[in-house]
Image (cartoon, rainbow, N blue to C red):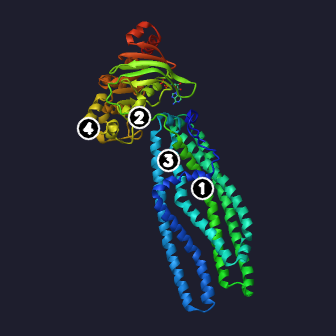
Amino acid sequence: MSRGPGRHLAPRAEDELIENPDPEARRLRTLLPYFRPYAWQTAATVTLMVLVTLTQLAAPALAQYAIDHAIAKNDEAVLGWCVAAFVLVGVLGMVANGLQSYASVWVGERVLFDLRRRLFRHVMDLELGYHESVPTGRTVSRLTSDIEALNQLVTDGATTLVINGLQFVGVVVILFLYDPQLALMCFAVFPLLAIVTAAFRVGSARAYRRTREKVAEVLSVLQETLAGMRVVQGFGRQDAARRAFGDANVEYRRANMSTIYLSSLYFPGIELLAAGGTLIVLWSGTERVLDGDLTVGVMVAFIGYLSNFFDPIQQLSQLYNTLQSASAALEKINGVFKTTPRVADRPDAVAMPPARGAISLDDVTFEYRPGRPVIEHLSLEIPAGSTVALVGATGAGKSTLAKLIARFYDPQAGSVRIDGRDVRDVTLDSLRAQMAVVPQEGHLFAGTLRDNLLFGRPGADDATLLAALAAVDEGDLLASLPNGLDSPVSERGTGLSAGQRQLVSFARALVADPRILILDEATSSVDVQTEHRIERAMDTLLAGRTAVLIAHRLSTIRNADMIVVLDHGRIVERGSHDALVGAGGRYAQLHGDWHSLVDA
Ligand SMILES: Nc1ncnc2c1ncn2[C@@H]1O[C@H](COP(=O)(O)OP(=O)(O)O)[C@@H](O)[C@H]1O
Ligand SMILES: [Mg+2]
């Protein structure tokens, strides 16, 4: 359903459409544990629901009693009691109804709150690989529209189910108790009712499923188009986008209309059957009343109960859609829960003590997808405090190597060690606390400049922040922000250029003061001037740390202690700049290309 490019990179993620024949009831039962913390509140809510139903069922019976025992016998005292009981039941019903509405929402919202929180925590724990392979929109809809589908069930649907279910059963029992013969006659419409309802259920389930699919299509077109707006407008493809959206939109409308079409047939149909039932009661009842075989009160009660009989059927048949979409949503949510983090702390993981920063990779093999190793039997020692530059063609595996060092992924074979400790033996938190990664496009979060700089070290004071900024910036950045550290920044819309945002992410890494710094083409998206500035700041940035530098530009690489040339996941050359140029191999070739570029 999703047309996102990430779809093809999703070997493990649960798919959007789950065709699992798991029965709905069993699926919905997985929601029950979330009610456990609110057991007595839930019990109270159900009790209130029963009370509401009882008060609703009492009214026709009271009317029957009043007619047969007070009016027919001209007994004012009994009539008084009946009226009093009627008022009492009415008031009780109102109060119970109010409390019940409140209580069911109270419980429902808490259950959903817990679910949302647990799901978000789980998503936070899933390794980067998950987030790189599953389109963001899909994860977002797990936490929003899927939870919303459950919301309809938990707050509203459950109430409808219990009250209407009890009412339906109650009416059937009461009518049989009153007069089995008349009851049987009324229920003669039942087979027809069952057929019509079953047909509606099947039809509306199908139609409803289509609306869900179509709305997902509309959303996916929308998301794709908006995310790629620069390209869409750049190529003047707005018309195509309009058409694509228009098509999806038309289909969505049609799907919606078909559900309305079904309802507008079904509901009047039920009304008709209800009228038929009433007719039967009036016709056969009147005859029997005249024969002295039935009281007027019972006949009136029958007519009263019949509306209590057809109403629940309508409500319950509509509920089916709610149940269905809730169970589909739950299935998808459970799919996320079932996805266990691939990179996680071992039970016996210990906190990593402050590192010196020696990195060693020992015969590491890694593949994103089975059978396609991206890093093969790679061994590399990076002494503490030294700077290593990784060079190689696009796709050689440089970024992957950096991600292995930061343990965003675990290798299939071999090990990554820091200060001689396998990174899998220490906690992720303590490992990452010693590292900072500056990717090609550092992400700025909505907030102030200060918030963003503090990201890696929440306690740092302003002087530290300003010093970090000063190290990478000659004052232009701060000058462009009138409120200094309090200036709002974000990914978009606050007037920072891509280069300036990158300067902020450099400063952020400096504030974090990591033992190991990984720069993954961190300067490739900035302009030449900014890059020169960062290069001049490089001494400060790298001083006293172990650094892994991935860069395209020669000037950044030249001063590294060791240059490692990668090709298809293997190291083909390593050594200092001068040594490698002298050796006349791959690096010398790259070096030659750079020169000819610069000279041209
Ligand atoms: N998340 C991913 N899932 C599957 N394959 C990936 C993923 N990331 C990178 N690759 C593949 O791994 C190889 C190395 O990628 P990468 O490490 O990003 O190279 P470099 O940084 O040297 O350009 C490429 O062939 C790329 O297609
Ligand atoms: Mg890369």
Along the line of sight, the residue nearer the viewer: 294 or 12: 294
**Pointer 1: residues within 10 angstroms few (<14), some, or many (20+)?**
many
Q: How many marks?
A: 4
Residue 500 visible in the picture:
no
Residue under label 2: 348
Q: Are marks 4 and 1 in contact (CB under 8 Å)?
A: no
How much space separates mark 4 and mark 1, taking CA atoms?
54 Å
Q: Earlier in the sequence, mark 1 or mark 3?
A: 3
Q: Quadrant of the C terminus?
A: top left
Q: Residues within 10 Å of mark 2 (few under 14, many from 20)?
A: few
Foreground disc of the pair 2, 3: 2
Q: Residues within 10 Å of mark 3 (few under 14, many from 20)?
A: some
> Looking at the image, is mark 2 or mark 4 nearer the viewer?
2
> The residue tagged with tag 2: helix, strand or loop?
loop
The local secondary structure at tag 4 comes to helix
**In the drawing, what numbered circle is on residue 143?**
3
Location of residue 52 in the rendering, given as x and y in whole percent from the top left corner: 54, 70
> Of tags 1 and 3, which is closer to the observer?
1
| Distance in Å between CA atoms under marks 2 and 3 | 31 Å
| Number of the front mark, 4 or 1 | 1
- Name the amino acid type tagged 4: Asp
Q: Mark 1 sits on what residue? A: 323
* Outermost left residue: 463
Q: CA distance from mark 1 to mark 3?
A: 18 Å
| Residue type at tag 1 | Leu
Mark 1 and mark 2: span between their CA atoms?
43 Å
State the mark number for residue 462: 4
Residue 434, placed above or below residue 201: above
